[in-house]
Amino acid sequence: MDLKGYLDSKADEYNNKSFIDRDPIQIPHAYTSKEDIEISGFLTATIAWGNRKSIINNSNKMMKLFENEPYNFIVNHTEKDLKHFIKFVHRTFNGFDLIQFVKSLKNIYKNHSGLENIFSQNIKDEAMHNSIHQVKKIFFEIEHLKRTKKHISDPYKGSAAKRINMFLRWMVRKDDKGVDFGIWKSINPKFLSCPLDIHSGNIARKLGILNRKQNDHKAVLELDKYLRKLDVFDPAKYDFALFGIGVNEKL
């Protein structure tokens, strides 16, 4: 089997509903409305580093703070409603950061027609890197805590932006597997990048499809180039292969 055939088979193997039970994507799968899915997905992806069980547990804690109605809470909350958020913590993301995210998301939905609109209106060079950059700018156009800015990555400052690329995969990819949502119709899946982390990066290097040692923006661009040769229409599907092999198999 050639490398494309191998990666296609592994993507197919791991891209199924059993994946949801072990992955943070289960959080947005608890919702049915577009806005609840994308907001819960964005917040979950924001804290998606470290142990997956801890990510899932703390994401559920966030949703309880929103009374399991994230969109309604975001657009209609008062300052008093936020007092319970102070105690929240996931690694370096704390309650003050979460409050800032609530306020910034309210601005995005009230004044910028939502997350999908910003991402879709800022696509450049057939990739999502500029969109991510612009989302961060708009996210912090309101008064904000300086410390919170580190929790949204910027590819133009060298970041691989793994968590936002993962969120975009969730929202944009559409197939019949039932894992990714495909609810953002205004963005073509061919523009997506594979979320690059220690697992996918290590496997990509072992397979000889990534040479750069650091997991940074330049590495994402290198991996983009290769994966789009394998599947020009759906390069991000290989996230399932690279991540799945990295977490579950010895290569």
Image (cartoon, rainbow, N blue to C red):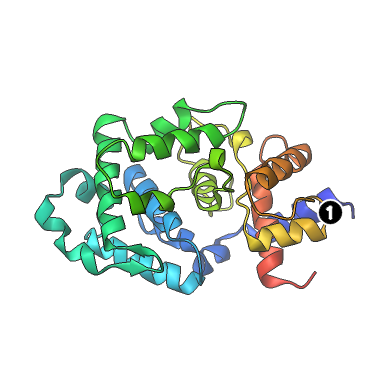
Q: Is residue 36 left or right of residue 183?
A: left
Q: Is residue 168 above or below residue 55?
A: above
Q: Which residue is mark 1?
A: 208
Q: Is residue 179 left or right of residue 94?
A: right
Q: Position of residue 140 (x, y in %)?
A: 33, 40
Q: Position of residue 207 (x, y in %)?
A: 82, 57
Looking at the image, which residue sits at the far front?
146
Residue at the image point whose x is 80% and y is 51% from the top: 211
Q: Position of residue 98 (x, y in %)?
A: 29, 57
Residue at the image point whose x is 47% and y is 62% from the top: 24
Would you identify the image quadrant in which residue 109 lies? Answer: top left
Looking at the image, which residue sits at the far left?
80
Q: Mark 1: few, some, or many residues within 10 Å (few <14, many ≥20)?
A: few
Residue at the image point whose x is 69% and y is 47% from the top: 219
**How many circles with numbers are drawn on the protein?**
1
Amino acid type, mark 1: Gly
Residue at the image point whose x is 43% and y is 48% from the top: 152
Q: Position of residue 178 (x, y in %)?
A: 53, 53
Dot 1: element: loop
Q: Is residue 208 above or below residue 59?
A: above
Residue nearer the viewer, 241 or 96 = 96
Quadrant where the image shows the N terminus = bottom right
Quadrant where the image shows the C terminus = bottom right
Q: Is residue 185 left or right of residue 115?
A: right
